[in-house]
Amino acid sequence: MAAKILLRTQTLLQLEHLNPRIQEELNTKSLNAKICPINPMEFDLINKLLQANRTDPSLQEYREKVKDVTSLWSLKNGLLKHRERLVVVKKQNL
């Protein structure tokens, strides 16, 4: 639960896009906010993982298990999950 809250409250706006006045206000107020740089390469990896999860044929047998309502497998927004965790395809390049 705490991890979900952290993800929902993380800052995604890069520092150079903030108005200097806003930067100053963030520094002077006692907010629980911090400015963290984002590496665009991380989004490429995430997109590749999500795409592979949705399309890789090696996961087809697990997609079939979703049909069993007692199974620990699920499909949400086209993403295959096991015990509510994203399934990652075993590939060297990922």
Image (cartoon, rainbow, N blue to C red):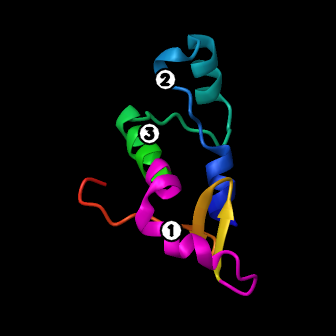
Q: Which image quarter holds the C terminus?
A: bottom left
Q: Secondary structure at mark 2?
A: helix
Q: CA distance from mark 2 to mark 3?
A: 18 Å
Q: Is residue 82 visible?
A: no
User: Which label sits in the foreground, 3 or 1?
Assistant: 1
> For the point 60% across and 58% down, which residue is it?
79
- In x, y percent, where is residue 72? 64, 82
Q: Is residue 39 part of the magenta span, yes or no?
A: no
Nearer the observer: mark 2 or 1; the answer is: 1
Q: Quadrant of residue 44?
A: top left
Q: CA distance from mark 3 to mark 1?
A: 25 Å
Residue under numbered circle 2: 15
Give the dominant element type of the magenta stretch: helix, strand or loop.
helix
Q: Please name the residue that numbered disc 3 is placed on.
A: 43
Q: Quadrant of residue 78?
A: bottom right
Picture residue at 67% right of the left edge, 45% below the top: 9
Residue 38 x/y as whole percent:
44, 35
Callout 2: few (<14), some (14-19), or many (20+) C-alpha neighbours within 10 Å?
Answer: some
Tag 2: amino acid = Leu
- Label 1, on which residue? 60
Q: Which residues are magenta?
A: 51-71
Badge 3: how crowded within 10 Å, few (<14), some, or many (20+)?
few
Q: Return the disc, 2 or 1, that comes first in the chain's sequence.
A: 2
Which of these two is toward me, 93 or 8? 93
Q: Is residue 36 visible?
A: yes
